[in-house]
């Protein structure tokens, strides 16, 4: 008589012992973000569309994680449109690691990460802000990442970023030279790292 041993996650992983006492294994390979979303532990952190009115570097998005577990991101995306008077068609996203929230200057707006499971009441603990196009600053030192992106293109990057408790990331944007009007936004999806 066959016996089936199944885990309790409801995701369909099972091991079966057949009549000859051999194991038959069935497993479902599932993206960690899907499982995280199902558990209410996947979040989108994003800035709204912010119109940059100069070609100076300006703060865009700030994240400081304050959970007892790590989070990871596998993709992030950004898009800029309709740059006016820009002398070339690329903008630059830069990332600064380890910036304290108290170091931010200029105008920043608090934002709440979106839980991708609309039926979940889970929230992501930390400090999350997006920059104002009128001068959100607070960055200094050397950026750890510099990514030039073309204007008028949806830009998505695959990555393997892990955010341990207390880690922070500040993203800035530098529009093309001579820009006077460039709408831009940025978003990143993070998922609780399973232990």
Image: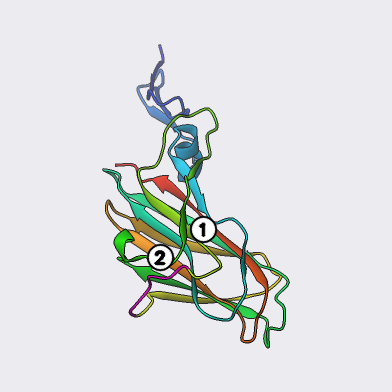
Query: In the image, is 148 to the left or to the right of 16?
Result: right
- Tell me which secondary structure the magenta stretch mostly adopts: loop
Q: Of discs 1 and 2, which sits in the foreground?
A: 2
Vertical position of residue 112 compared to residue 76: above or below: above
The magenta span reads 136-141
**Which quarter of the rendered picture does the C terminus lie within?**
top left
Instruction: Work out whether residue 37 can be spotted.
Output: yes
Residue 75 is tagged as 1
Which residue is found at the position 50% from the left and 73% from the top? 58
Say which of 42 and 31 sits in front. Answer: 42
C-alpha distance separating marks 1 and 2: 16 Å
Is there CB contact under 8 Å for labels 1 and 2?
A: no
Residue 162 location in percent, x, y?
A: 35, 57
Say which of 53 and 171 sits in front. Answer: 53
Instruction: Decide which of tag 1 and tag 2 comes sooner along the chain.
Output: 1
Instruction: Work out whether residue 31 can be spotted.
Output: no
Q: Is residue 139 magenta?
A: yes
- Badge 2 is on which residue? 170
Which residue is found at the position 42% from the left and 52% from the top? 128
Which residue is found at the position 30% from the left and 65% from the top? 98
Q: Is residue 66 magenta?
A: no
């Amino acid at each position: 008589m066959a016996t089936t041993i199944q885990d309790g996650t409801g995701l369909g992983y099972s091991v079966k012992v057949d009549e000859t006492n051999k194991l038959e294994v069935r497993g479902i390979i599932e993206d960690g973000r899907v499982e995280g979303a199902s558990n209410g532990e996947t979040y989108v952190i994003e800035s709204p569309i912010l119109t940059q009115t100069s070609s100076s570097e300006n703060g865009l998005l700030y994240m400081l994680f304050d959970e007892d577990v790590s989070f990871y991101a596998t993709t992030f995306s950004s898009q800029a449109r309709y740059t006016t008077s820009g002398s070339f068609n690329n903008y630059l996203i830069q990332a600064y690691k380890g910036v304290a929230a108290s170091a931010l200057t200029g105008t920043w707006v608090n934002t709440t990460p979106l839980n991708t499971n609309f039926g979940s009441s889970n929230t992501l603990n930390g400090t999350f802000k997006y920059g104002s196009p009128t001068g959100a600053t607070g960055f200094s030192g050397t950026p750890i990442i510099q990514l030039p992106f073309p204007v008028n293109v949806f830009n998505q990057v695959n990555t393997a970023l892990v955010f341990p408790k207390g880690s922070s990331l500040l993203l800035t944007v530098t529009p093309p030279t001579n820009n006077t009007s460039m709408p831009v936004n940025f978003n990143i999806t993070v998922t609780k790292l399973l232990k």
